[in-house]
Image: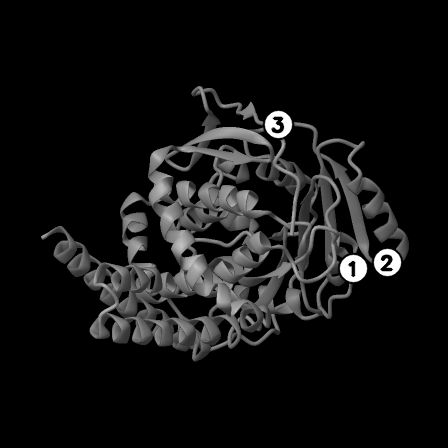
Amino acid sequence: MFPVIVAAFTTLLTLAGVVYYLLAMLAARAYLRRALPRPEFAPPVSLLKPLHGLEPGMAEAFAGHCRQEYAGEYEILFGVHSLDDPAVEAVVQLQEDFPERAIRLVHCPEVLGANGKVSNVAQLIPHARYDYFVINDSDIYVGPRYLARVMAPFAPPSASQAGQPATGLVTALYRGRTHGANGAGGGTVGSKLEALGISTDFIPGVLTARWLDRRLRFGLGSTLAVSRAALEAIGGLETLADYLADDYQLGLRVDAAGFRVELASEVVETTVPAWNFSGFAQHQLRWLRTMRTSRPWGYLGYLMSFGLAWAFLNLIATGFTLPAFALFCLTLLVRLSLAFGVGVGILGDRQVARDVWLLLPRDLIGLGLWAWSYASDTVVWGGTRFAVRQGKLAGANGERQGAPVEPPPTIQN
């Protein structure tokens, strides 16, 4: 009876996965058909960028922020924990290359919590001159209309929208850019798996959650544009200094404070490190365990998103029968439709076509990591081991500070 039970179990989960893929495609269609705000609202804005070390392509990413076609004023504030950080030289060079831009370097020496990025940005806020803040990482590449499209949803409601809450947070979808170990194009297997997962798994999940909830209730770290009023309403960024998923928590709290969370029409790009498989798995476990401790019941439902992996396991469980093969082909067709529809159609990620052969291995590995995420609540972040409890970072021994770990293995293609 055991093979029969396994076959029935995998069949049901495969069908659930197909339903999820179809829902995700409907959510993507709803996103494409949404009404876009006109980029006419251009208030003064402060771009806040936390820095820690040099990263490949950083100078190019910085330059994109200085070439904005934006009707309003804007300034760029870079925060460093130490003035000996090598990123300081990159900021000085940027000031020389773009003397017409208001670019400032701010020393942020305090440690407000376990999340160094939040600690850094919270210390930038008092130095910002304007009432709107755009927070993103040093490896984010943007187009020339980025600021205009991110700020557009903050426009006051029109007469037809009277009664709607004010927008408090705007976030943006993103795709990954892979690099090889030497900084060249192509990418390692680990970076390809990560980028493919962003475009074909994570972002479809974001769109599905937005569609099912009829609103967005979280932010994405690629862009967090927040008004000063919304930030003050949630008690400031300092309240997030011990959370790993600060973007998720920020959106959740802004929504709870009565503000809207919106998606910008801009898709940005982030650099995916040249991970080997171990680095990829470590990063995935960090994200999975954070999500599991933050939303335990929603995370359990995430099991349904591995439809292609379940269809393959169903093939094995049934002994490669014709009905199981037909179900696998159907699941593969729907999975590919979702991958290309979101990855290429919405995100403009051309790497999806190049790496589509990794889709089944990526989903099988993802299912395995999902199961393994229940084995522990520890994660490795920035070379330090933490325990994640209800989304908060704590040392592996229960203290707030984490324990250092050995450096990761040498990156290999």
Between the residue at mark 1 and the residue at mark 3, the CA separation in whole angstroms equals: 29 Å
Name the quadrant containing residue 145: bottom right
Name the quadrant containing residue 371: top left
Q: Residues within 10 Å of mark 1 (few under 14, many from 20)?
A: some
Relative to 82, residue 320 above or below = below
Dot 2 or dot 3, earlier in sequence = 2
333 with respect to 126 (left or right): left
Contact between labelled residues 3 and 1, with CB atoms less than 8 Å apart: no
Q: Position of residue 323 (x, y in %)?
A: 21, 74
Q: Which residue is mark 2?
A: 98
Number of callouts in the render?
3
Write the residue at 32% across / 75% down: 329
Give the label on residue 10, or none.
none
Observer-nearest residue: 368 or 396? 368
Observer-nearest residue: 267 or 302? 302
Give the label on residue 111, or none.
3
Amino acid type assigned to the residue bearing label 3 in the image = Val
143 with respect to 93 (left or right): left
Give the label on residue 63, or none.
1
Dot 2 or dot 1, earlier in sequence = 1
Amino acid type assigned to the residue bearing label 2 in the image = Phe
Name the quadrant containing residue 114: top right
Label 2 element class: loop
Write the residue at 64% across / 42% down: 125
276 with respect to 390 (left or right): right
Q: Position of residue 86 (x, y in %)?
A: 80, 38
Q: Residue furthest left?
A: 1
